[in-house]
Each structure stands twice: as C-alpha cells, then as structure tokens.
Amino acid sequence: YLNNIKYINNDLKEIMKYSIPIAFMGPLGWLSNYIDRYILGIMLNYSSAGIYSATSGIVGKPYSLVTNVFSNYFKPSMFAENCIDKVKKTLFIWILIVFVFGFISTIFLYLFGEFIVNIILAEEYRVGVLDILILFSISQTFAIATHASDNFLLSRGLSLKLLKLQVLMIFLIVFVPIGIYFYGLTGAILAKCIVELLKFIIVTSI
C-alpha cells in the first residue's frame, strides 16, 4: 500500500511538473496575441485598432479552423510515437503543409481580398485594408507553423522549457510600437509578421 502511495505521488509530481506550465500558456498566449492592438489604440487611435482587429478577424478565423484540423490530424501521432526521428518527420510534414496552405491563402487574398473586404467591411474601413489582409495572412502562417513546433516540444515533455521561451518572446512585442511609429497601421502588421517569424525560428530551432 505504501509503495502504491509512493508511486502515485511520483506520478502526480510528474503530471504537475508537465501541466502547470501549460496552464500558464493560456493567459500568456492571450497577452501575446492581443497586446498589439492595445498598443495600436494608444499610439494611433481606436479607429485604427478597430480596423486592425476586424481585418485580423477575417484572416484569423479560417486559420484557426485549419490549425484545429492540422492539430487533430498530426498531434496524436506526434505524442504517441517514441522514435524521435519519426516525430521530427511528422513535424516537418506538418510545417510543410502549413506553409503550402499559407502560400495558397495569401495568393487567394491577393486575388480576391478586395471582393471579400467589400462584402465584410463598411466603406469607411476599406481603404488600405487589402495590404493589411495579405500581411495578416503571412503572419498567421508563421503563427500556426510555430504551433506545430510548440506541440513537438510538448510531445517531448518540455512544457516548462516552452513556457520559458514564450515568456522571453513576449519582449518581441517591442517591434510593434517601432513599426507603428514609422509606418502607422501598416507598420503594426509588418511588425506582427516579424514577431511571428522570429517566434517560429526560435521555437523550431530548439
């Protein structure tokens, strides 16, 4: 009985060691994803922040749906497989498909984005939105590619290491006010692209 208690306690310690960092990733992810629009609202105006949010929503929802599909397909095999080479192969395929999807989506928005914007957004919010829409597509491609790399680290039991990386990467947000200062609304999304690219490079290189 005492041995069973000992094993249970050891298991609980391992579970907590893995799960507690994941619990902190939720609010940290929210902060990372939404703080840029608050910075935009403070530095420019809330109208620009509204355009930024509306445009990101147009792109973000389809990308979010696709991310869930990819996760449901690749994640189980990544977590169930013990052979590191096979897990890395799964990660490579996942990232490759993400970039193919991102390329096709960006081309689609380049060709039909104006039509989509005219349907979804009011006339006063349409000026210059097409370029922002395309840039959002690029930034979201890097974001969901990073999600694949996040799951690779989680499948290896490296949740604490991933949390530390995410805490450090919060400071990449410094690119956003710099971009806004020089290029306004477009600068904000250009900075977003840089931030997401750097996140992808950092997490994938671990």
Image (cartoon, helix red, strand yellow):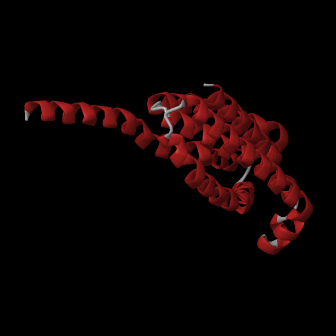
Give the residue furthest to the top: 206
> Does residue 30 appear left or right of residue 129 in this picture?
left
- Can I make out residue 30 in this image? no
Q: Residue 74: where, in percent of width, then height?
A: 59, 48
Observer-nearest residue: 112 or 124? 112
Q: Residue at x 89, y 57 (%)?
A: 110
Q: Which one is nearer the viewer's eye here, 135 or 146?
A: 146
Q: Position of residue 136 (x, y in %)?
A: 76, 51
Q: Is residue 142 above or below residue 64?
A: above
As drawn, the residue found furthest toward the bottom would be: 119
Pick out the residue farthest to the right. Answer: 111
Which is nearer the eye, 34 or 74?
A: 74
Q: Is residue 133 visible?
A: yes
From the top left corner, tell me how far across and down residue 200 is, in percent. Answer: 68, 35
Compared across the picture, whether 152 is left or right of 183 comes to left
Instruction: Report whether 28 appears left or right of 107.
Output: left
What is the count of numbered marks? 0
Where residue 169 appears, as percent x and y from the top left, is 60, 31
Q: Quadrant of the N terminus?
A: top left
Q: Residue at x 12, y 30 (%)?
A: 3
Q: Above or below — where is 24 with respect to 160? A: below
Image quadrant where residue 150 sits = top right
Query: Toward which corner of the image does residue 54 lie, by quadrant?
Result: bottom right
Seen in the image, is 169 located left or right of residue 182?
left
Q: Is residue 14 above or below residue 58?
A: above
Is 3 in front, or is 60? 3
Quarter holding residue 72: bottom right
In the rendered image, the quadrant that contains the C terminus is top right
Asked if residue 202 is positioned above or below residue 135 in the image, the reply reads above
